[in-house]
Amino acid sequence: MASEETRTMTPPTVRSPAAHGAGKPGGAATRAWTMRLLVLGIVLSALNLRPAITSLGALLEEVRDGLGMSGSVAGLLTSVPPLCFAVFGVMAPRLARRFGAGAVVCAGMAAIATGLLVRPYAGGTAGFLAGSALALMGIAVSNVLMPVIVKHWFPDRVGSMTGLYSMALALGTALAAAVTVPLTDTLGGSWQTGLALWAGLAVAAVLPWLPFVRGRATPPGAGEGAAEAPQTQSPAAPSAEHARGETPRLRMARSRTAWALAVFFGLQATAAYITMGWMAQIFRDAGVPAGTAGLLLAVTMVMGVPLAFVIPRLATRLPHQGPIVLALGVCGLAGYAGLYLAPAAGAWAWALLLGVANCAFPLALTMVGMRARTGPGVAQLSAFAQSTGYLISIPGPLLVGVLYQHSGGWGLPIALMSALMIPQMVVGFLAGRDRTVEDEAAR
C-alpha cells in the first residue's frame, strides 16, 4: 500500500551523527537540536524557491519597459525557470553524492542570494537573464533534493514533512507576489530595488545549513567500516549505501510510472509558471490596478499554504491519488473559463480556483516520495521527474507570450492553458496508481 511505502526506513547501517550519539550523555539533546535545525533549514529553503519568479511576475511590466523587452522576449524570460530547473536539476543527485545534500542546498541558497542581488543591476536583458539563471540554478538543485532529504530523515512522516515545506514554498511564493509592488513603491519606486530585496531572505536560508557543509558522503570503496564513521557524513548527506554505489541505478526511462509522473510534473509546472509569470498581467490588462493584480496573484499562491499541508497528508492515506488530480484539474478549468469570460468582474473567484489547481505541485512531490521505496530510488525518480518535467514545461510560458503579442489579447493564451489541463489530468491519474518504480524495474 502507498502508506506502507512512505514508512520504508533507511538501511540500519546508515546512522546520522545525532543518532550515533543518542545513547551517550547529551546524545538525545544533540539529535533533537540537529533535527530542529534541519526542519528550520527545510522551511527557510522552501520559502526561497519561488520569490525569484513571482516577484518578477508582479513587476514584469516595469522590467519590460526598463529593459526594452518585447512580449516574445518577456515570454522567453518566463520560460527561463523551467529551463534552468531541467538543466541544473539533473545534476543534483550527483552533487549530493559527492558533497552531501546539505552542502549542496547551502550552496544553492547562496546562489539564489547572489543571483537575486546581481540581476537587477547587471545591465541589459542578457545580464538580467544571467543573474536569473544563477538564482534559478540554486532553486533547481534544492527542488530536487528536498524530497530526498525528507525521505531519508523523515521516512515515517513523508506526507506531513512534504506538506510543511510545500506550505512554506507556497507562503514564500504568495509573499513575494503580494508585497513586491508595495515595497517597491515604499522604497522609491525602483523595480531594481524591489527585485533585489529578496536576496536577504536567501541569505537567511544559508545559515541553518552551514553546520552540514563539512559533511561528505562516504567515498566509494570505503567498505563497511566507513558506515560506522558517522563523523564523516552530514545529517543531510545521502546514505552510505548509496554513496558506495551499492544501489543499482534504476532505468527510469523504462518505467511507465516514472514517465506518467514526469509528464504530470511538466504539465502542472507549465500551468504554474504561466500563472506566476502572466496572471498579474492578465488582470492588469483587464483594468485591474497593479497593486490589486499583485494581491490577486498572491491569493492564488497563498491557497497553497493550507492546501499544501492537507493534500500530501490526504494523498499518503489513499491507495490511488487520481481522484485528487481530477478535482484539482476541474478547479483549474473553471478558473481559466472565468479568466476568459469575466477576468475583472470575478477576479477574486478565479484567483482562488487557480490557487487550488496549483496545488498539483505538492501532490506531485508527494507522489515522488510514494512511487519509490528507497531513498536512492526517490533521488533518481525526483531527478528524472523534475528534470524531464521542467523540459516539458519550457515552451508553455514562451508560447503564451508569443500568442499574446501576435493576437493582441488573452483569448488564445487562455485557450492554450485550458487545453493543457486535460492531458495533465489524464497522466496525473495514471501516476497516482499504487505501484513503485523499483517493482517495475524488477519486472
Image (cartoon, helix red, strand yellow):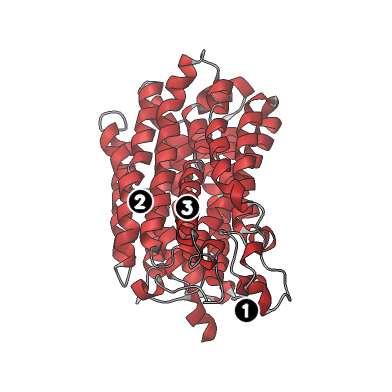
Residue type beneath disc 1: Pro
- Regarding residue 218, the answer to whether it shows in the image is yes
Left-right relation of 172 to 130: left
Foreground: disc 3 or disc 1: 3
Closest to the observer: 436 or 207?
207
From this view, report whether residue 69 is shown above or below residue 130.
above
Judging from the image, what secondary structure is the residue with disc 2 in?
helix
Q: Do the residues labelled 3 and 1 touch (CB within 8 Å)?
A: no
Q: Which of marks 3 and 1 is nearer the N terminus?
A: 3
Residue ID for mark 1: 248
Q: Which of marks 2 and 3 is nearer the N terminus?
A: 3
Q: Could you tell me which residue is drawn at 56 percent across and 48 percent down?
A: 395
Q: Could you tell me which residue is drawn at 63 percent across and 73 percent down?
A: 227
**Cα distance between the residues tagged 3 and 1:** 34 Å
Residue ID for mark 3: 33
Q: Could you tell me which residue is drawn at 29 percent across and 61 percent down?
A: 314
Tag shown at residue 308? 2
Judging from the image, what secondary structure is the residue with disc 3 in?
helix
From this view, report whether residue 183 is shown above or below residue 128.
above
Q: Which residue lies furthest to the top in this view?
A: 188
Judging from the image, what secondary structure is the residue with disc 1 in?
loop
Q: Residue furthest front?
A: 25
Residue type beneath disc 2: Ala
Q: Could you tell me which residue is drawn at 61 percent across and 36 percent down?
A: 113
**Cα distance between the residues tagged 1 and 2:** 33 Å
Q: Residue furthest bottom?
A: 443
Q: Position of residue 384 (x, y in %)?
A: 57, 64
